[in-house]
Image: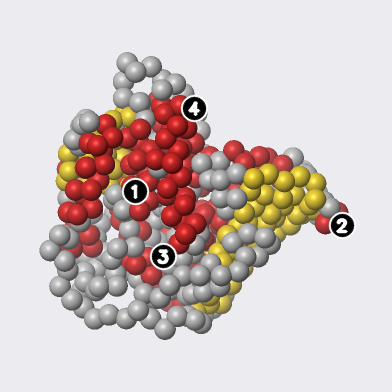
Amino acid sequence: MSGSRRREFLRDAGLGVAALTLGAGTARSETAQKIRVGLIGPGGMGTAHLRLLTLRKDVEVTHVCDPDRKRLAAAAELVQGTTGQAPKAVEDMRRVFDDPRVEAVFIATPDHWHAPAAILALQAGKHVYVEKPCCHNIREGRWMVETAKRSGKQLQVGTQSRSTAVVQEAIERLRRGEIGEVLVAKAWNSQRRGTIGRSQPAPPPEHLEYDLWVGPAPMVPYRPNMLPGVWRWWRAFGCGDIGNDGVHDLDVAVWGLGVTTHPSRVSCLGGKYFFDDDQEFPDTQYAVFEYPAQGEGKPEGKAEKRKQLVFEQRIWSPYVQEGYENGAAFYGTEGMLVIGHAVGWKLYGPRNKLIAERTGSADLQAHHDNFFACIRGEQKRLNADARAGHLSAALCHLANLSARVGRTLEFDPEKEAVLGDREAAALVGRKYREGHWAVPRG
């Protein structure tokens, strides 16, 4: 999503949809017990969540948390200005987890905090909404899935397309076989990003508790082009744009392709073809994932075939493809369906005949509704649970690994291990700051 599109989405996800939000929030009795929520990381996406949460009648935002005191003050002011009640404003997330009044937490931190914070929250008995990608590496994703299962709490991943009605209809059409058997899906991220420039280590600003911000990641010197938001281009803290915007499209592609496991082979060519700056991730990537045949044990002739998922990324290119800037396409034996992220979709039959099309934007409100309904027991299934989030995030990590080592990787979907490549296998997890209180455990 381009910078302007992202700003439009954040605007529409916030006060711009106040009427829709209030309609959903007032549907519940004013006397119903509110779910008490703490929000960690009120940056761009965190603030979008906060605006929606403060307008709900069934939620009380009791805590906001950020190691950046300026952001923390702005978040507390937003909550008080909207609800008339001041939340507790804390720099250390442990104060949120330790408060027994808090029932659920929203985690919109940098990527390296997603899984560690989610695991700590689950262990503290909280329900969790965690932003995408749900983990910084594959091993953390597995730990998060296992912890969520043991805890019995709800964990929703912030891939809101799964709660968006227009996308749900598109996936249902795939399930009904309207384009035949789907064997290949493609996702893409094509947009024009800006350079992050180059910098040297420098003292962190006085309003930032940098030690808390780094958390369990290895300590590295602060640099001016690391914050805010730029952390996503640094390996210690982010996953590149494939883990930022790309994961939304990969998630829809995996969902529509109908696979329920990891790929068994991945090959990714990529690098910095355009930007001459401090970014540590590719600005250009082309990845191919192959999924093993599924359905062993089915009657003869009924087992599913192997499937393929392709991902393209060019974050220096201001041009759309397939008619959409970011999206996912599905290729079936009887047609094709193309989904534009936060735009809509088109379904084509034989000879490229347009059969149906819809327009519609991503529905963050609906994703919140599903999360809270599951907490209350009013709905039985999260639309983007820990397992779904892990499968999509793992594609980002596998593509980055393959591009980094420059080799095709063989991957064991069950053991979640790279086979026959020690260098790549070591990168399935990460190193942590020794003795840090937030180092995750399996």
Give the farthest residue toward the left.
Answer: 206
In the rendered view, does 86 fall on the left or right side of 403?
Answer: left
Amino acid on which the number 2 mark rests in the picture: Arg
Which one is earlier in the sequence, the residue at label 4 or at label 3?
3
Amino acid on which the number 4 mark rests in the picture: Gln
Q: Which colour scheme is used?
A: secondary structure
In the rendered view, does 181 fall on the left or right side of 382?
Answer: right
Label 1: state its secondary structure.
helix
Label 4: state its secondary structure.
loop
Most foreground residue, 122 or 311 = 311
- Can residue 200 be seen here? The reply is yes
Labelled disc at residue 379: 4
Most foreground residue, 127 or 335 = 335
| Residue at mark 2 | 351
| Residue at mark 3 | 239
Which one is earlier in the sequence, the residue at label 1 or at label 3?
1
Q: Residue at x 60, y 44 (%)?
A: 360
* Distance of label 4 from label 2 (alpha carbons): 41 Å
Which one is earlier in the sequence, the residue at label 3 or at label 2?
3
The image shows residue 367 at horizontal and vertical percentages of 47, 39
* Distance of label 2 from label 1 (alpha carbons): 45 Å
